[in-house]
Image: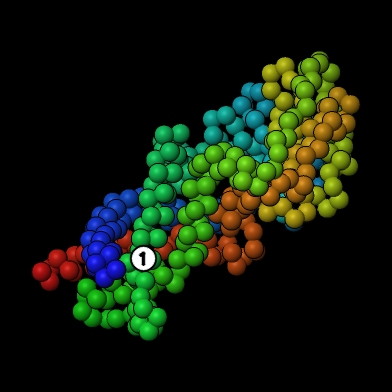
Amino acid sequence: MLRRQAMSTSSAWRFRPVLKWLHLWLGLSVGLVFAIVSLTGTVLAFQSELLLAAHPELDRERLPPLALQGHALARIVAGAEDSGIRSVDLPSPRLPAWQAFTAKGERHYFDPANGELLLVRNTGNDAVMWMRDLHTHLLAGEAGEQVLGASGIVSLFLLLSGLYLWWPRLAALAASLRWHAAPPARRWLSWHRSLGVLLLPLLLVVTFTGVAMVYSQPLRSALRWTFADGPEVVPPLPIERRTIAIDWPAVLLAAADAAPRGSELRRVSVPEGDNALVSIRFRAPGEWHPNGRSVIWLDPYRARAVQVHDATAQGTGARISETMYPLHGGFVGGRAWQWAVAAAGLLPAFLLATGFLFWRARRRRR
């Protein structure tokens, strides 16, 4: 018995130096990517506010009625093929202008009442758009997103290994969280450990949700299987395109009638190819996602809803998977969570700096 305990203790002592070495060198390498991506996340937590501050022409005190917005949408859709627009977000109090997404990654903004083009943003002319591309794709498209996902997994390892390396005896808990001014090695280590531990739950949530968004499909499938959600919703059959014009005001009004009471219409997908079926995402009461994950499919020629998918009626696994984006982006919980997400973005840079300064101070002491 004593021999087994001795062997177990010996293995633990051999494991700890290896873990410390991994934590140090992964932190000084992958931690740099983690810090840069997190700092851009701090900026993106306020992207709507920054957009309106930089472009006050987009702001409106009052939104036009839905029927008038429909006429503006008709004008936007008329030029959608030439501009490569795939979907359009309806005006909202948060962003009181039409926001269109193109195949080239640009964003076009239109007047909510008449559909007049007001602004075009892309990574070449807008710093926040450039930071968003860095935050989501490391400026390298799909390959960058996969690198980002792998870096996120390593970052989770760094956070959890740091917790393991810090974990003190109960009697030493208060002392382990104390900040020291000197000597330098002790100062940087105490700052690194104490702030890292105190804000660890927040940083774990933001980091995990970021990784979950990169691997959203495998995670969603796993969650749906775990909670026995059943099959995914199947969209209705395509509708053949005709030469007659679509009455977009009538389509929006039909969608508003088909959505559950208290819902907010959020995103219109422009018909593509030979399929005229229109899908409109809406935010049902109780949804966290800023654009909602509920969908109405409509026959645009009859201005009639064909099928309605209410995301709040999904199984538990699907609903959990759809909380990742609003939690990560600070879109739920009001200003308090928005500021918490922004603060979490500053922490990896602080941990990287204090970890490096501790390593350098310790080398000098030796």
Report x, y in % for residue 187. 27, 76
Q: Residue at 44% across / 72% down in the picture?
A: 198
Q: Is residue 179 left or right of residue 292?
A: left
Outermost residue, left side: 366
The quarter of the image holding the C terminus is bottom left
Residue drawn at (21%, 75%), measured in percent from left and top? 184
224, 296: nearer the viewer: 224
Q: Position of residue 58 (x, y in %)?
A: 66, 48
| Viewer can see residue 90 | no
Q: Residue at x 46, y 34 (%)?
A: 142
**For residue 78, above or below residue 169:** above
Q: What residue is pinned by disc 1? A: 164
Nearest the eye: 119 or 144: 144
Residue 19 visible in the displayed image: yes
Q: Crowding at label 1, few (<14), some or many (≥20) Cα neighbours within 10 Å?
A: few
User: Quarter-wise, where is residue 108 in the image?
Assistant: top right
Q: Is residue 185 left or right of residue 32?
A: left
Which residue type does callout 1 highlight? Tyr
